[in-house]
Image (cartoon, rainbow, N blue to C red):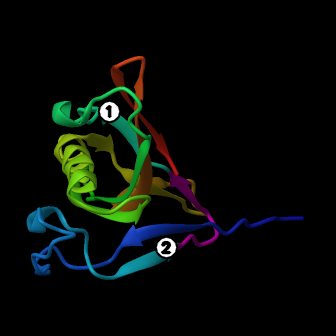
Amino acid sequence: MVICPCLLVAGCSTPRSAKVPLTAQTHFGKLAPPASVGRYQLQPGQVAIPPALRHRVLPVYPPSLVHAGAEPVTVIVRVAIDREGNVTGIQPVIMDKSGVDHARFVAAVRNAVSQWRFYPYRVQTHEPDGVVSQAPMPVTLRYAFEFTVDHGKPAVQSRRK
């Protein structure tokens, strides 16, 4: 009996030349992810090799917002990664607060994540004749950043969503 698992992985399917309008939410317009996101459907004999973070910079808690009793702030972003593992887009998808202060947290996330580098997402194909090939593919991932102040000390944690 042969079992062929199918896996759907979110990926970017927009040409690199797509123009993204500069808006308040995407004030780093050149880093905004493509407007359309497709899905890859693996075929029999294909295996997904997920991207791996190879260079990470944590966001810096905005110094002017550090004070005792500061409420935690969470910023969740969608990160578009190209075939070479470079970040090509960063877009907030869920924000637990709005306003000028929250925009500073989003800016801190954008500044840090724009410096990240990944080993790219790859689709490995096993041909019936035994030949194995790999094709790097663009992909979009979600990350959450939690900004907290504990005993007057700022901290930032990140995790993949």
Dot 1 falls on a residue whose secondary structure is strand
Question: Dividing the picture into quarters, in which one does residue 129 lie?
Answer: bottom right
Q: Which mark is residue 32?
A: none
**Sequence-first tag of 1 and 2:** 2
For badge 2, the amino acid type reads Tyr
User: What residue do we see at 59% from left, 72% from top?
Assistant: 43
Dot 2 falls on a residue whose secondary structure is strand
Q: Which residue is mark 2?
A: 40
Residue 136 in the image, given as x and y percentages of width and height:
34, 57
Of 74 and 18, the residue lying toward us? 74
Left or right relative to 77: residue 82: left
Graded by Cα atoms within 10 Å as few (under 14), some (14 to 19) or many (20 or more), the crowding at tag 1 reads few
Of 133 and 3, the residue lying toward us? 3
Residue 139 in the image, given as x and y percentages of width and height:
38, 62
Residue 24 colored in magenta in the image: no
Q: Which residue is mark 1?
A: 54
The residue positioned farthest toward the right in the image shown:
1
